[in-house]
Amino acid sequence: MGPDLQYTGQRPADTVTLRVYAGRDAVFSLYEDEGTNYNYEKGAYAIIPMRYEEANGRLTIGPREGRFGGMLLKRVFRIEWVGQGIDAAKGAAVTVTYDGRTKTIYKP
C-alpha cells in the first residue's frame, strides 16, 4: 500500500507499506513505472521481487530489475507483520530503507 495520491505524477509513492500475513510462504513482485506515459512499452519500468518464507520468518526483498526516469533509487518500506486473523493493526511493524540491493528482514 502506498500513500494517498490525487494523480500519478503528484509525487513519488514513498513510503510503501507491505503487510506480511503469517501462516504460509508467499511471493510478490512490486511493479513500478513513470505512471504518466507509455515508456513502459519501451522497457522503462522496474520490478522488485519479494519472497516470504514462513518456516524461518524471513522476508527477502530481492534486487531491483530495470529502471525508469524519475525512479526512486532509495525507498522506504514499512513492513507490518500480521498474525492469524484479519486485524492488521495488531501486527508488529518494522521500517527498512531499500536501495535496490537484496534486503533480508526477519519477523520479530
Image (cartoon, grey):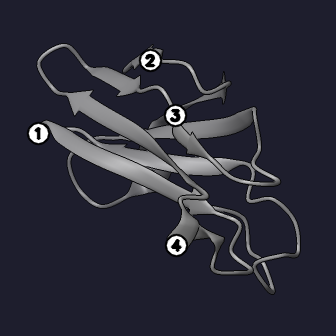
Name the mark nearer the viewer: 4 or 3: 4
- Contact, mark 2 vs mark 4 (Cβ under 8 Å): no
Q: CA distance from mark 4 to mark 3?
A: 18 Å
Q: Kindly report the distance in space between the C-alpha atoms of the residues bearing marks 2 and 4.
A: 33 Å
Foreground residue, 54 or 87? 54
> Which quadrant of the figure has residue 93?
top right
Disc number lying in front (2 or 4):
4
Secondary structure of the residue carrying tag 3 is loop
Mark 3 or mark 1, whichever is nearer to me: 3
Dot label at residue 64? 3
Mark found first going from the N terminus, 3 or 1: 1
Circle 4 is placed at which residue position?
41
**Circles 3, 2 touching at the beta carbon (< 8 Å):** no
Along the polypeptide, which appears first: circle 2 or circle 1? 1
Q: Which mark is residue 105?
A: 2
Crowd around label 2: few <14 · some 14–19 · many ≥20 (10 Å)? some
**Left or right side of 12 for 33:** left
Circle 3/circle 1 CB separation < 8 Å = no
Question: What's the amino acid at mark 4?
Answer: Glu
Query: Which of pointers 3 and 2 lies earlier in the amino acid sequence?
Result: 3
User: Which secondary structure lies at badge 4?
Assistant: helix
Q: In the rendering, which numbered label is found on residue 72?
A: none
Query: Spatial distance from mark 3 to mark 2, Cα to Cα?
Result: 16 Å
* Disc 4 from disc 1: Cα separation: 34 Å
The three-letter code of the residue at mark 2 reads Ile
